[in-house]
């Protein structure tokens, strides 16, 4: 899937189902999601295997019980290379062959491109001790024996395929890039998300690690045994003798250039010594620098350790009990904004670290919250912070530290769930409802679900924390799959801020020609006068969100996506927020040449202009993905805001997350409905989360705080509940809504997006995929509802027409099996140029 397909940076995405049961892993039916022809596969019989394999076999986690032992991946039945032909002629091998065959060491290998494997290869004797699961290999693939890089997922004794295996040609890694539990996680993800295992490995192991970024090979010279013979050394020409004696005297290996400097000679004498066999060589891969970290750690907050509140110590007690029980328990810490969740995480990790174990803390993009980062770095001796602005060399350096076991805490975004800590004891997801935990390209995984799988297989607790938990996690506490821990009040018994709704339908409430209502205007003035700080939320970036001709009605749209372009004032650009297509904003209508084109709709840039005009004294900063492009820019703005150099911060949802500034006395929400009327069953949930979270940024100090929410739908349940900080009311009402349609968390949803250059060919492909889904559903007897194909709200993206199919079921196993069976042999003729993407537990329907 193209990155950017679901990149709606200003639209918060929602949550994902809590797995209550997870399908078994069967590495043999790695899915295919592209149009290339697949290798021959086992055909009809496999369909039957699919039924029993996916619908009745024990779950993945049964298979993963002994995560530490070295047993091969359970239930693996690799499809042998070119199996079908061989099977025509061969029956059981004769017994004498059996003994020989059993002695054959075999590696199962998967690939990132089709055919995806797994296929079995013989491990030649000289590679037997070197090859382990989690390493990359070179193997010959296909009839042409094309040399291909693959990942070894299993090594075993005995060739079960009944035919001659090709040899592994080369082992590419000195040590496994992931340990066995992580290899098992790969095969589970590949199965559950229907994404080739080779591609899952690529998501798991950063490209900087695969490419050994920031390292180079260096060859070290030391005296060879032959140089111990004095007479030999004495007989050498002067320069050679000098160099060799220096090396012997040094007592440690040197590179050729070091030795040249030392011995004040050229390369000649050293090469001569080499040729005479008087030097031995040793090549190592080394980091080129000792890693300087480019980011300061602090945003200006002081270190504080607090006496825990009663809520906090109760929460900590329940978490340490789970840690001590060494069970794979899922805990949901529901603590209102400002209840001190971070302190609880830190204490829980201290408990973990005491026993020599380590923790992972997943956060929505860390560069947005330098504060969180600072809190962890100040409290632990060895923290690895992973974030999107690291260089490849930094990333690789941190990864190596983590793998060597030098790190107590890893803090990072969703991909940090794969951090290769050797003694992981706890995984925490902070702001667990956040949409950034779902990846919108292959493999389309959700970090919460992967964290759950990893925690289960290692038998360690998973701690989810939020003031506005996803309904999936909430429902899990209601159905007994997770334990609920509540922190219903703020630290220091500070009250929740007062929320006032401004009904924008009433004309008097609206301001003439502006975005800021009379009440909000007054409140900002008052706050500034009291030397308090203000946060204003508007979840749309750009200046104007539509460019329309008032004469002919033409809307300037992206030629590739057909979505309206957003006018950006800096540079006078019109930009597609879906694909980044950019043109100069046309000064007149491109259709009818009318010169008086109108910029409608409100973005953060326009709001900034209005704010500066209304409050000329205020020092204002804007925070959105346009102003925050440069590394470190969040930190700069946030430290300035903390130190009081700024009075007013306005921006998109990135200012709604996790910030803790005691002097913020007013939060204004410019338009609470922006996301409410999206064609998505999570629209209400996202609105509730966003309003509650941003409202929670105030009243965090001793001076109190208040919130003004402007809305066209003040009676909407999500906005009502948010205005009362009433999560329970919201959750109960929303669960009842979802129950009517079996939407998550009550049922499971999957989405298949079909895209192609020609509209009717794309639609026809979607229809034939639908037929296949219908017939698999019938063969499996699966209770799955099929909807579509229909054009999604974004019906065209980057020049491709799009259709989608939705699948719904109460049983995620049946849902997965239906798709797997339908797509297993589904091939789209190359000339059609149509691709499809499977999205299990999709987070948006756009
Ligand atoms: N026991 C305590 N006593 C006093 N202050 C505390 C205590 N625990 C935490 N704090 C302070 O309370 C503030 C809020 O804590 P924190 O930012 O962890 O809240 P939170 O629950 O994560 O809120 P949000 O969900 O809004 O991010 C912080 O400034 C923190 O230093
Ligand atoms: Zn576009």
Image: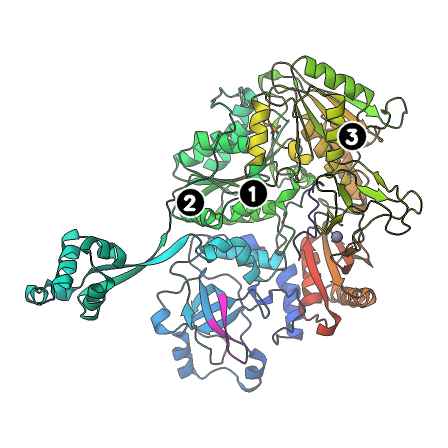
Secondary structure of the residue carrying numbered label 2? loop
Rendered position, 449 above or below 674: below
Rendered position, 758 above or below 425: below
Q: Residue at horizontal 16%, vertical 59%?
A: 243
Q: Where does the image place residue 445, in percent across and percent down from the top left? A: 62, 51
Dots 3, 1 in contact, CB < 8 A: no
Find out whether residue 147 is within the magenta segment.
yes
Residue hosting label 2: 423
Residue hosting label 3: 719
Res. 367 image quadrant: top right
3D distance between C-alphas at marks 1 and 2: 20 Å
Res. 222 image quadrant: bottom left
Tell me: is circle 3 under 8 Å from ligand 1: no
Q: Nearer the viewer, residue 682 or 642?
A: 642
Rendered position, 532 above or below 260: above
Q: Residue at horizontal 20%, vertical 55%?
A: 264
Residue at the farthest right position: 551
The disc, 3 or 1, on the residue closer to the chain's N-terminal end is 1
Disc 2 packing (10 Å; few <14; some 14–19; many ≥20): some
Find out whether residue 799 is within the magenta segment.
no
Taking the image in four quarters, ligand 1 sits in the one at: top right
- Look at the image and give the residue range highlighted in magenta: 139-150
Q: Nearer the viewer, mark 2 or mark 3?
A: 3
Q: Quadrant of the N terminus?
A: bottom right
Observer able to see residue 724: no
Does residue 224 appear left or right of residue 59 in this picture? left
């Amino acid at each position: 899937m193209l990155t950017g397909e679901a990149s709606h940076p200003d639209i918060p995405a929602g949550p994902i189902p809590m797995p209550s049961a997870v399908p078994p892993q069967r590495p043999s039916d790695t899915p295919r999601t592209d149009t290339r022809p697949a290798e021959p596969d086992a055909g009809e019989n496999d369909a039957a295997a699919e039924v029993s394999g996916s619908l009745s076999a024990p779950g993945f986690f049964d298979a993963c019980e002994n995560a530490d032992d070295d047993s091969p991946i359970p239930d693996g039945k690799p499809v042998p290379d070119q199996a079908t032909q061989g099977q025509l002629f061969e029956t059981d091998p004769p017994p004498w062959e059996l003994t020989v065959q059993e002695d054959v060491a075999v590696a199962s290998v998967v690939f990132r491109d089709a055919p995806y494997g797994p296929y079995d290869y013989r491990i030649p004797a000289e590679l037997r001790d070197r090859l382990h699961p989690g390493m990359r290999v070179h193997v010959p693939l296909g009839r042409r024996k094309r040399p291909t890089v693959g990942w070894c997922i299993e090594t075993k004794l005995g060739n079960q395929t009944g035919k001659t295996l090709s040899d592994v040609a080369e082992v590419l890694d000195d040590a496994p890039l992931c340990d066995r539990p992580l290899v098992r996680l790969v095969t589970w993800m590949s199965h559950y998300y229907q994404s080739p295992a080779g591609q899952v490995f690529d998501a798991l192991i950063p490209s900087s690690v695969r490419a050994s970024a920031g390292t180079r090979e260096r060859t070290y010279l030391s005296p060879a045994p032959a140089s111990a013979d004095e007479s030999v050394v004495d007989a050498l020409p002067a320069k050679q003798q000098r160099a060799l004696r220096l090396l012997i005297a040094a007592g440690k290996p040197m590179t050729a250039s070091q030795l040249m400097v030392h011995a004040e000679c050229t390369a000649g004498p050293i090469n001569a010594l080499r040729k005479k066999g008087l030097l031995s060589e040793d090549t190592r891969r080394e980091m080129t620098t000792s890693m300087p970290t480019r980011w300061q750690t602090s945003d200006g907050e002081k270190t504080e350790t607090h006496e825990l509140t009663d809520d906090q110590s109760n929460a900590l007690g329940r978490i340490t009990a789970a840690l001590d029980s060494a069970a794979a328990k899922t805990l949901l810490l529901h603590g209102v904004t400002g209840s001190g969740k971070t302190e609880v995480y830190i204490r829980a990790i201290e408990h973990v670290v005491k026993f020599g174990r380590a923790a992972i803390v997943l956060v929505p993009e860390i560069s947005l919250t330098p504060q969180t980062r600072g809190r962890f770095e100040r409290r632990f001796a060895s923290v690895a912070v992973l974030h999107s602005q690291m260089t490849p060399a930094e990333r690789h350096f941190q990864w190596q530290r983590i793998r060597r076991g030098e790190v107590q805490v890893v803090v990072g975004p969703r991909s940090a769930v794969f951090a290769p800590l050797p003694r992981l004891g706890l995984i925490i997801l902070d702001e667990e409802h956040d949409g950034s935990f779902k990846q919108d390209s292959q493999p389309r995984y959700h970090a919460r679900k992967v964290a759950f799988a990893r925690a289960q297989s290692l038998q360690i607790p998973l701690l989810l924390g939020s003031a506005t938990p996803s309904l999936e996690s909430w429902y899990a506490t209601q159905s007994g799959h997770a334990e609920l821990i509540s922190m219903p009040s703020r630290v220091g018994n500070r009250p929740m801020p007062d929320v006032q709704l401004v009904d924008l339908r009433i004309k008097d409430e609206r301001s003439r020609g502006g975005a800021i209502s009379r009440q909000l205007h007054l409140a900002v003035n008052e706050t500034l006068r009291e030397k308090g700080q203000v946060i204003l939320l508007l979840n749309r970036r750009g200046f104007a969100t539509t460019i329309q001709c008032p004469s002919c009605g033409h809307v300037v749209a992206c030629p590739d996506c057909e979505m309206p372009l957003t006018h950006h004032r800096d540079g006078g650009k019109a930009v597609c927020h879906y694909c980044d297509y950019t043109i100069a904003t046309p000064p007149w209508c491109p259709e009818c040449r009318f010169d008086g084109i109108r910029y409608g709709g409100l973005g953060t840039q326009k709001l900034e202009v209005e704010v500066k005009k209304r409050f000329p004294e205020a020092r204002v900063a804007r925070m959105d993905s346009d102003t925050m492009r440069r590394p470190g820019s969040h930190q700069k703005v946030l430290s300035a805001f903390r130190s009081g150099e700024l009075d007013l911060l306005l921006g998109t949802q990135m200012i709604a997350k996790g910030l803790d500034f005691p002097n913020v006395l007013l939060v204004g929400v410019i338009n609470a409905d922006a996301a409410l009327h999206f064609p998505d069953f999570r629209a209400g949930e996202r609105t509730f989360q966003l309003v509650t979270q941003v409202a929670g940024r105030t009243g965090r100090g001793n001076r109190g705080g208040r919130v003004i929410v402007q809305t066209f739908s003040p009676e909407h349940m999500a906005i009502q509940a948010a205005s009362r900080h009433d999560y329970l009311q919201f959750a109960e009402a929303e669960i009842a809504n979802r129950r009517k349609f079996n939407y998550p968390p009550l049922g499971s949803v999957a989405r298949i997006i079909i895209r192609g250059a020609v509209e009717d060919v794309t639609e026809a492909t979607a229809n034939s995929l639908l037929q296949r889904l219908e017939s698999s559903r019938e063969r499996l007897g699966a209770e799955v509802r099929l909807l579509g194909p229909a054009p999604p709200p974004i019906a065209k993206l980057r020049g491709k027409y799009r259709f989608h199919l939705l699948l719904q079921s109460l049983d995620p196993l049946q849902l997965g099996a239906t798709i797997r069976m339908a797509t297993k042999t589904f091939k789209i003729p190359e000339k059609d140029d149509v691709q499809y993407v499977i999205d299990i537990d999709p987070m948006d329907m756009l």
